[in-house]
Image (cartoon, rainbow, N blue to C red):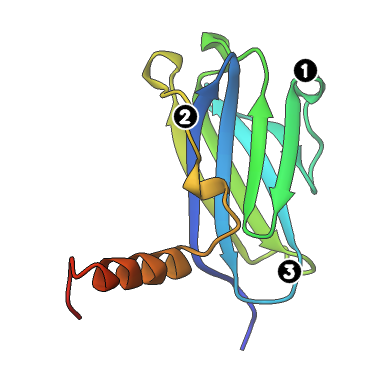
């Protein structure tokens, strides 16, 4: 059985002050490290922003900040303006297997972005399944639902 990036890949976008925040949440069903690439497609041209393969474009290098945890990769693009609007992509690959990849796109328009507020559950190092199971147990304990 070939290892694969498991279950889900979810890409969300929101605004923190004047920075675009892209959350790329994933599940990895293997012990193989995951490589990543964030890119922007604008006017049919792909611009690499950050990643472990490919070369980020010089104009974006000083504007990006990247963090990674077990199941989430977060990219910040500082000084986000309408010139940065377009389709953002998060692509993930298992190390050593360049032909197997998963990607997710999100269209970003400055006037339609929501502000990142409160505790973002996507940024937590918690599996969605575990969160669901804990929620069901809590609801059952309070007699809100019966299973």
- Category of crowding for the residue at label 1, using alpha-carbon neighbours closer than 10 angstroms: few (below 14), some (14–19), many (at least 20): few
Residue underneath mark 2: 117
Judged from this view, the residue extending furthest toward the bottom is 1
Horizontal arrangement in the rendering, residue 109 relative to residue 140 (left or right): right
> Is residue 117 placed above or below 27 in the rendered structure?
above
* Label at residue 4: none
Q: Earlier in the sequence, mark 2 or mark 1?
A: 1
Q: Position of residue 111 (x, y in %)?
A: 39, 13
Quadrant in the rendering for residue 45:
top right
Q: Earlier in the sequence, mark 1 or mark 3?
A: 1
Instruction: Residue at 49%, 33% (x, y): give it.
Output: 13
Quadrant containing the C terminus is bottom left
Residue underneath mark 3: 97
Element class at badge 1: helix
> Is residue 13 placed above or below 135 in the rendered structure?
above
Quadrant in the rendering for residue 90:
top right
Of 119 and 3, which appears nearest the observer?
119
* CA–CA distance in space, label 1 to label 3: 29 Å
Q: Position of residue 42 (x, y in %)?
A: 54, 23
* CA–CA distance in space, label 3 to label 2: 37 Å
Q: Position of residue 83 (x, y in %)?
A: 56, 11
Element class at badge 2: loop
Residue underneath mark 1: 59
Mark toward the viewer: 3 or 2: 2
Instruction: Residue at 50%, 24% (x, y): give it.
Output: 86
């Amino acid at each position: 059985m070939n290892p694969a990036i498991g279950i889900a890949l979810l890409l969300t976008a929101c605004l923190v002050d004047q920075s675009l925040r892209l959350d790329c949440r994933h599940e990895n069903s293997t012990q193989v490290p995951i490589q990543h690439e964030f890119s922007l497609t604008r006017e049919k041209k792909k611009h690499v922003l950050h990643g472990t393969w490919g070369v980020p474009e010089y104009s974006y290098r000083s504007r990006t900040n990247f963090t990674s945890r077990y199941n989430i990769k977060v990219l910040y693009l500082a000084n986000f303006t309408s010139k940065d609007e377009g389709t953002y992509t998060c692509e993930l690959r298992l190390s050593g297997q360049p032909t197997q990849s998963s990607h997710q796109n999100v269209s970003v328009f400055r006037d339609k972005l929501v502000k990142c507020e409160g505790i973002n559950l996507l940024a937590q190092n918690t599996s969605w399944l575990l969160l669901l199971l804990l929620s069901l147990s809590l609801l059952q304990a309070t007699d809100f639902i019966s299973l």
